[in-house]
């Protein structure tokens, strides 16, 4: 295949979620869209077979990598490389999520209170046994992948071939977290009462 035979129907769009400290990062999960079909890989859960097959059978791979470490991690962890890698971060001056509005893509209401840092927290929750935490990570990663997919065609000036539906859902806040928050607020209220017993909070100018 030469560079002019790239099939827009055979591109591997993907988003990775990374954990670890600076210089010791590793990929914890990957969500991809290839031939308009979704796929995912999770560390210590899935084999590499499906990921490698889709990657190698694609004409190009596309992601958004501001830190420019994704491809090095793909090679380090999976032995994968692709000479036709396209990093959309090179074509944009902003963070991926902030670009959504600029290109006319609605930001899902489910992600209003969800930040990228939550992904690492959800990974910890998942390895502790919370299966639904992985569902939330995949939803976040799939939304990024869908944005990458749509952004790619907008940059190319071509119409988006298909609107795809995300097969994962964002986990709602568990009740136990709400109870924990209430306990913290009550604790603060008790602390304030104790402070009032030992400190005078009256206005120092009341008696002037």
Image (cartoon, helix red, strand yellow):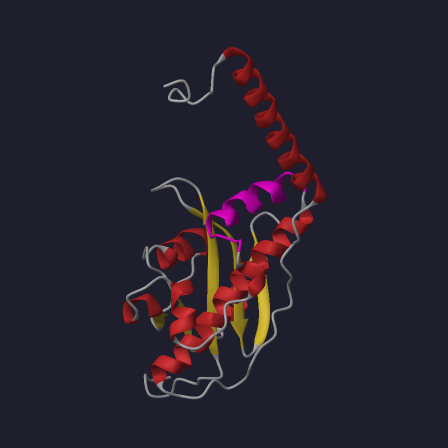
Identity of the residue drawn at 59% across and 66% down: 39
Q: Nearer the viewer, residue 125 or 54?
A: 125
In the foreground, 21 or 139: 139
Which image quarter is the C terminus in?
top left
> How many numbered discs?
0
Of 150 and 94, which appears nearest the observer?
94
Please tell me whether residue 119 belongs to the stretch shown in magenta.
yes
Q: In the rendered image, is residue 18 in sight?
A: yes
Left or right of residue 153: residue 190: right
Task: Confirm whether the magenta stretch covers residue 88.
Answer: no
Query: Magenta part mainly helix, strand or loop?
Result: helix
- Compared to residue 1, the image places residue 176 above or below, namely above
The x and y percentages for residue 56 are: 47, 70
Above or below, comparing residue 83 to residue 30 in the picture: below
Q: Which residue occupies the extreme right position in the image?
A: 175
Check the image and report above or below for 121 versus 53.
above
The segment highlighted magenta reads: 113-129
Look at 57% across and 27% down and name the residue there: 188
Tell me where residue 204 appears, x and y as whole percent.
39, 19
Q: Is residue 46 visible?
A: no
Q: Residue furthest front?
A: 208
| Residue located 66% across and 53% down the image | 172
Q: Foreground: 130 or 101?
A: 101
| Residue 191 x/y as whole percent | 56, 21
Residue 87: percent from the left, percent from the top? 34, 68
Relative to 41, 5 lies left or right = left
Q: Residue furthest top?
A: 198
At a point 51% along the width and 11% down the height, the residue shown is: 198
Q: Quadrant of the N terminus?
A: bottom left
């Amino acid at each position: 295949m030469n560079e002019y035979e790239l099939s827009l129907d055979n591109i591997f769009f993907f988003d990775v979620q990374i954990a670890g400290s600076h210089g010791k990062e590793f990929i914890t999960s990957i969500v991809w869209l290839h031939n308009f079909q979704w796929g995912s890989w999770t560390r210590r859960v899935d084999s590499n077979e499906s990921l490698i097959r889709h990657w190698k059978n694609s004409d190009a791979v596309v992601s958004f990598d501001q830190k420019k470490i994704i491809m090095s991690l793909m090679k380090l962890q999976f032995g994968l490389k692709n000479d036709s890698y396209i990093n959309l971060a090179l074509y944009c001056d902003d963070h991926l999520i902030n670009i959504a509005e600029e290109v006319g893509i609605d930001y899902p209401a489910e992600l209003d209170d969800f930040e990228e840092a939550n992904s690492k927290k959800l990974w910890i929750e998942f390895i502790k046994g919370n299966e639904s935490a992985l569902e939330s990570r995949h939803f976040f990663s799939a939304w990024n992948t869908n944005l990458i997919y749509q952004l790619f065609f907008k940059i190319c000036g071509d119409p988006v071939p298909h609107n795809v539906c995300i097969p994962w859902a964002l986990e709602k806040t568990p009740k136990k977290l709400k109870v924990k928050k209430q306990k913290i607020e009550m604790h603060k209220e008790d602390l304030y009462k104790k402070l009032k017993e030992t400190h005078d909070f009256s206005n120092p100018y009341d008696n002037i």
